[in-house]
Amino acid sequence: MKVVFVGVRKEREEEITSGPLKIGNILYNRLSKKYDDFYFYGLSYEEKSEDADKVHIINDKEVIGPLNKLKRFVKKNNIEVLYIARYYSALALYAVFLKIVMKIKLVYTVHGLVIKEKDINKSFKNYSVLCEKLLLKNCDKIVAISHALKDEILQYYPWIDENKIEVINNGVSEIFISKKLDIRKIYGLEISKNILFTVGIRKIKNIELLLESFVNNTELYTSSYLLVAGETDTEYAKVIIDKYKNYDNIKFIGYVDTNEMNNIYEQMDLFIQVSKFETFGMSIVESLLHKKQVLISSNLPISEYFKEGEINLYNGNTEDLALCIQKSLKLKDCTNEQGYRKVKSQFHWDSICEKYYNVFRETAQKH
């Protein structure tokens, strides 16, 4: 069995903030140490130099190069299975091309559906939806990171064979702070006020509900700050930021690196995620790894893994969000040991890696 991972290569796990990038890189790091037949073809999407169209050899198993040189790498190394952890339209099309001309097998981890993102966030075009459809149609195995996402895949693409979809959760690992930062000093936060934190300025994140609940509850607003990390350059994000620009206790902080993110986790009083849908919720799990209180929507798929005492739940049909935040803040001085132990056991990388290895092995043996 010879498997090639194709995507953007990041060697330093502690610097990765993207869930799909974590899966691709952390899986490869662990599997390649344990087994011989794993390769990584790093795409030079982020390469800006004149050498971006050349293949750079990292070692005998890893290279970085343009997509159009991938076929040569696959042929040279007798690759049997091509694995994609993060969606790119061009990669999806090229992978289907390789399957047709080289009879290679395809495995793809779905973190979210392009067709749904197009409908909700308008972040993809029809071309990308077509590429996703072609990729899913030609995959030998599809990995969904939650049972809810598997259901969603079958809802949008009912012609997919359900037996072709395997559910494997994302793995998590503790990443310790490399440099201590004073978050209150960086963002000018008074010592007496609570720090609330959320991630993502997109419609699917239900960010307007959170912002409106925050500013309309005077007691909560005057006693707290809300830090909002994530994209600031999309049309939707620009509208949201402009709408709330005069609220001093809301801080839109943009994208932050892993070290600053971990400092925020460590110093915040409550993490909040009330998305309409989350395929997994990496930030939720990372907050729990810092033994912090977390408030999430009760309709999120990840909520099914937790019981009372491990996480705080908000029911959008019956509860007032601001009151739920205030209730959760009463626990801010309680170290969340139960939530920490749950994510350590439920989403451990060792078990996740073995599940993926079995998927690759079974796919390679399939006739």
Image (tube, helix red, strand yellow):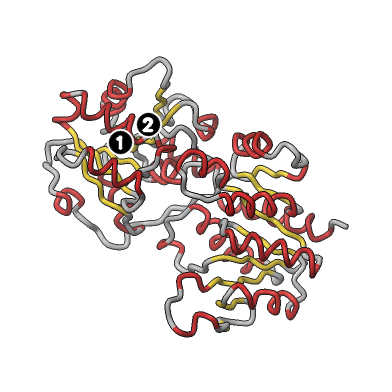
Residue 42 coordinates in the image, percent (x, y): 56, 72
Query: Left or right: where does residue 17 sit relative to residue 65?
Result: left
Up/down of 294 relative to 96, above or below: above
Residue closer to the observer: 196 or 125: 125
Name which quarter of the figure residue 361 lies in.
Answer: bottom right
Which residue has dot 1 on it? 270
Q: Residue furthest right?
A: 367
Determine whether 154 is above or below 37 in the image. Answer: above
Quadrant of the rendered image containing residue 16: bottom left
Q: Residue at x 71, y 44 (%)?
A: 165
Residue found at the far front of this picture = 126
Circle 2 crowding by C-alpha within 10 Å: few under 14, some 14–19, many from 20: many
Q: Quick one: SS at disc 1?
A: strand
Q: Is residue 244 left or right of residue 50?
A: left
Disc 2 element: strand
Return the residue nearer the eye: 271 or 237: 237
Q: Is residue 209 above or below residue 19?
A: above
Q: In the image shown, does 100 or 165 lie closer to the viewer?
A: 100
**Residue 255 lies in what quarter of the image?**
bottom left
| Residue depicted at x 61% and y 71% | 40
Q: Where is the C terminus found, in terms of image quarters?
A: bottom right
Estimate the x, y position of residue 5 in percent, counting from the top left.
63, 65
In this picture, residue 100 sits left or right of residue 26: right
Q: Is residue 143 left or right of residue 320?
A: right
Tell which circle, 1 or 2, labels the residue nearer the N-terminal end: 1
Mark 2 sits on what residue? 295
Q: Position of residue 80 (x, y in %)?
A: 77, 67
Q: Position of residue 321 (x, y in %)?
A: 32, 24
Q: Residue at x 52, y 44 (%)?
A: 118
| 1 and 2 marks in contact (CB < 8 Å) | yes
Q: Amino acid at mark 1?
A: Leu
- Three-letter amino acid code at disc 2? Leu
